[in-house]
Image (cartoon, helix red, strand yellow):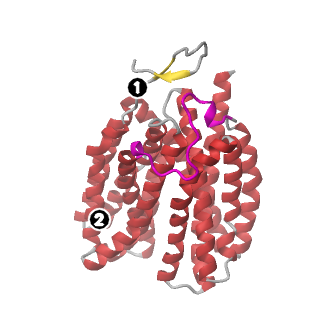
């Protein structure tokens, strides 16, 4: 019965990840419509989009307290509904100030949901006794890709984004609420040693080293996602179609690597897996920086995608095992990684303007190589074994 319940929870949280990704994928396809509808320059659009990362970074430290107060099922159900509902806000914005406010709310709800669903994922992974975090993030990528297909069709049909985003929100809210029925309805205080986190929890010290690894991975991801097409166009003189293909190759290899990543982690462990990923990502970066042909550069971006795909899932898993309040540690790591996602596009542009895009991707290559040396911080802690305490059966960590 316990095993069946855990499998049900695994399916539920995997579906939650897919729903979360669907929101992100849906919104990404309608950004051009929003820019054109509001008459925004690229600079103003970038300024507004930065508020999403700012909102996520500001709100994520609150997630641990919310999960502690209401329990993970109720917290996730409410936050996921809020995240789905916020999808409709950007397209309804009448001007730039309203769009900035909408993006802040959009990012805040996304970030808090992200923290709680990853905390649930870590808990289910520990119950199953095997790695599942990479697959969960793979489901997020699948949700993003499927929703982006729907978004492309809607955009091609010239469907008003206000209608498109509102309909998607209306469909995903009840679906997400239904899926959350399979999430374990535990409260963190029922777990051994858990204490109520502060109302606004700063990243714990245990999360800093793990967050640094996540920073490297997310920087490489954000830089490649945002600048790969520009790199192909400006450096190799490719067409718009070929430039778009570079991102497609990057996104597809990341999704495939995440879906298959758990098998690799179970066989080789997180440290060797991340080290191997760092080697692949570094090799991909070297190819991007040194290659002159379009196929070689696209292959380089694909290698970067494979190499960094599993870094963030393993960082969240390691954070969840690093303290007595998993959601607080995950929030700390998520805050650092979201900050990296905020910094990467601007840093790449600044360096490119001062030097060249080739130098910018030299920085990406350097950060990717940091995964090789930093991988040991993801080493699992001592296994959890049942130890009877004061007549109870609560599991505690043992040095066995």
Could you tell me which secondary element the residue under label 2 belongs to?
helix
Give the total number of marks visible in the rendering. 2
Going from N to C along the chain, the mark reached first, 1 or 2, is 2
- Residue at 50%, 40% (x, y): give it: 133
Mark 1 and mark 2: Cα distance apart in space: 38 Å
Residue 384 versus residue 87 in the image, above or below: above
Asked if residue 194 lies in the magenta stretch, the reply is yes
For this view, does 187 lie left or right of residue 380?
Answer: right
Residue at the disc numbered 1:
382
| x and y, in percent, of residue 399 in the image | 39, 21
Q: Can residue 143 be seen in this view?
A: no
For this view, does 36 lie left or right of residue 203?
Answer: right
Residue 148 versus residue 12 in the image, above or below: below
Residue 44 versus residue 377 in the image, above or below: below
Residue range corresponding to the magenta coloring: 186-207
| x and y, in percent, of residue 90 in the image | 64, 72
Could you tell me which secondary element the residue under label 1 belongs to?
loop
Residue 83 versus residue 309 in the image, above or below: below
- Residue at 40%, 75% (x, y): give it: 239
- Camera-side mark, 1 or 2: 1
Q: Viewer-proximal residue, 79 or 22?
A: 79
How many other residues sit within 10 Å of disc 1, few (<14), some (14-19) or many (≥20)? few
Residue at the disc numbered 2:
361
Q: Mark 1 and mark 2 in contact? Answer it, CB < 8 Å.
A: no
Q: Viewer-proximal residue, 181 or 224?
A: 181
Quadrant, the N terminus: top right
Q: Can residue 251 be seen in this view?
A: yes
| x and y, in percent, of residue 204 in the image | 44, 46
Q: Would you say the magenta stretch is mainly helix, strand or loop?
A: loop
């Amino acid at each position: 019965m316990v095993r069946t319940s855990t499998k049900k929870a695994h399916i539920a949280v995997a579906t939650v990840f897919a729903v979360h990704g669907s929101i992100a994928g849906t919104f990404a396809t309608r950004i051009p419509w929003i820019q054109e509808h509001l008459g925004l320059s690229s600079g103003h659009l970038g300024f507004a989009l930065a508020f999403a990362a700012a909102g996520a970074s500001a709100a994520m430290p609150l997630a641990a307290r919310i999960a502690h107060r209401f329990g993970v099922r109720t917290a996730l159900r409410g936050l996921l509904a809020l995240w789905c509902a916020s999808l409709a806000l950007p397209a309804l914005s009448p001007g730039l100030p309203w769009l900035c406010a909408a993006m802040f709310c959009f990012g805040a709800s996304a970030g808090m949901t992200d923290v709680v669903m990853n905390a649930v994922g870590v808990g289910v992974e520990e119950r199953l006794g095997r790695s599942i975090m990479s697959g969960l993030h793979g489901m997020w990528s699948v949700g993003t890709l499927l929703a982006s297909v729907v978004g492309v069709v809607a955009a091609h049909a010239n469907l008003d984004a206000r209608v498109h985003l509102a309909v998607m929100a209306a469909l995903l809210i009840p679906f997400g609420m239904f899926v959350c029925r399979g999430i374990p309805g535990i409260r963190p205080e029922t777990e051994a040693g858990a204490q109520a986190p502060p109302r606004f929890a700063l990243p714990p010290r245990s999360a800093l080293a793990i967050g640094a690894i996540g920073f490297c991975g997310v920087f490489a991801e954000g830089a490649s996602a945002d600048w790969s097409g520009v790199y192909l166009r400006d450096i190799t003189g490719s067409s718009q179609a070929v430039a778009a293909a570079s991102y497609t190759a990057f996104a597809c290899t990341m999704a495939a690597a995440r879906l298959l990543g758990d098998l690799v982690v179970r066989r080789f462990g997180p440290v060797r897996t991340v080290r191997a990923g760092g080697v692949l990502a570094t090799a991909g970066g070297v190819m991007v920086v040194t290659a002159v042909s379009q196929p070689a550069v696209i292959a380089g971006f694909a290698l970067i995608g494979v190499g960094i795909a599993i870094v963030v899932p393993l960082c969240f898993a390691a954070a969840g095992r690093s303290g007595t309040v998993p959601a607080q540690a995950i929030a700390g790591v998520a805050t650092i990684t979201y900050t990296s996602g905020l910094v990467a596009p601007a840093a790449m542009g600044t360096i490119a303007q001062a030097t060249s895009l080739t130098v910018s991707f030299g920085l990406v290559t350097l950060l990717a190589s940091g995964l090789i040396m930093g991988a040991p911080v993801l080493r699992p802690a001592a296994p959890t074994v049942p130890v009877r305490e004061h007549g109870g059966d609560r599991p505690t960590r043992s040095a066995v």
